[in-house]
Image (tube, grey):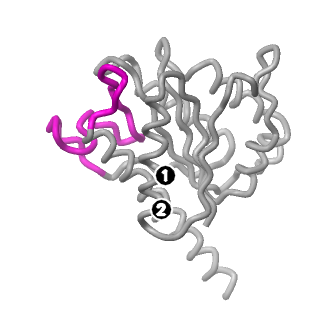
């Protein structure tokens, strides 16, 4: 199974989440996993230009998108990446039926981070992808996973440039969930092929 985590990180907090998600993916089964960071040099005159990242996503079974939340939405760098998918990738629905999920981090308890997750969900929907949110009830317990109660994906509040342990646990769990959901789809496809 091929999993891609594509993300942008400025201060390193989004990267911390990406690594926790990757560890969660690897804890379920052996996966071919790529952590693909959107870099500033990938963007020329406002346009994203890294075809290797797009090709890796083309080959993946599941894609987990991540971005910090700035001013109530994804970063400009992540948006440049998303805009670059609007041509052939979107027009030919090259990512259709792939599992997708998302994560974001901000500095406030809300900071409109849920809007960033909704942006990632819409990006996935535009591509015909199948969204895997969290199936962890957000109980409001400050020491429990999904303590901020987002079922759409992982939202996190960074404190002094660090991610707190319950949020890293939520990210780890999202990685596990994506692998399980992608595995269910692969098994269903295999059964269909046998019929």
Query: Is 92 rendered above or below residue 44?
Result: below
Magenta segment, prevailing SS (helix, strand or loop): loop
Residue drawn at point x = 57 percent, y = 75 percent:
188
Secondary structure of residue under mark 2: helix
Q: Position of residue 146 (x, y in %)?
A: 28, 41
- Which label number is shown at residue 135? none
Q: Which residue is mark 2?
A: 26
- Residue extending farthest to the bottom is 195
Q: Quadrant of residue 153?
A: top left
Q: Is residue 109 left or right of residue 29?
A: left
Q: Residues within 10 Å of mark 2 (few under 14, many from 20)?
A: some
- Disc 1 from disc 2: Cα separation: 6 Å
Residue drawn at point x = 49 percent, y = 25 percent:
68
Q: Position of residue 80 (x, y in %)?
A: 71, 24
Residue drawn at point x = 16 percent, y = 35 percent:
142
Q: Is residue 152 left or right of residue 37?
A: left
Secondary structure of residue under mark 1: helix
- In front of the other: 32 or 131: 32
Residue drawn at point x = 56 percent, y = 40 percent:
65
Magenta span: 136-164
Q: Residues within 10 Å of mark 1 (few under 14, many from 20)?
A: many
Query: Is 32 rendered above or below residue 164?
Result: below
Q: Position of residue 50 (x, y in %)?
A: 79, 35
* Viewport quadrant of the C terminus: bottom right
* Viewport quadrant of the N terminus: bottom right
Q: Is residue 84 magenta?
A: no
Query: Is 50 rendered above or below residue 132?
Result: above
Q: Position of residue 66 (x, y in %)?
A: 53, 35
Mark 1 touches mark 2? (CB < 8 Å):
yes
Q: Is residue 111 left or right of residue 63?
A: left
Q: Which residue is mark 1?
A: 22
């Amino acid at each position: 199974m091929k999993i891609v985590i594509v993300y942008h990180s400025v201060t390193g907090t989004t990267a911390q989440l990406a690594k926790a998600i990757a560890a969660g993916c690897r804890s379920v089964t052996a996966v071919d996993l790529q952590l693909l960071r959107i870099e500033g040099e990938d963007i020329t005159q406002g346009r994203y230009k890294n075809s290797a990242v797009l090709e890796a996503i083309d080959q993946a079974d599941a894609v987990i998108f991540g971005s910090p939340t700035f001013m109530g939405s994804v970063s400009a760098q992540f948006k440049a990446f998303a805009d670059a998918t609007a041509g052939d990738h979107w027009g030919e629905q090259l990512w259709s039926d792939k599992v997708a999920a998302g994560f974001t981090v901000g500095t406030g308890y809300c900071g409109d981070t849920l809007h960033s997750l909704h942006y990632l969900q819409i990006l996935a929907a535009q591509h015909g992808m199948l969204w895997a949110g969290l199936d962890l009830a957000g109980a409001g317990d400050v020491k429990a996973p999904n303590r901020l109660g987002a079922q759409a994906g992982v939202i996190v509040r960074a404190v002094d440039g660090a991610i707190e342990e319950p949020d890293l646990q939520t990210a780890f769990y999202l990685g596990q969930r994506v692998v399980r959901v992608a595995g269910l789809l692969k098994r269903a496809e295999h059964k269909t092929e046998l019929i």
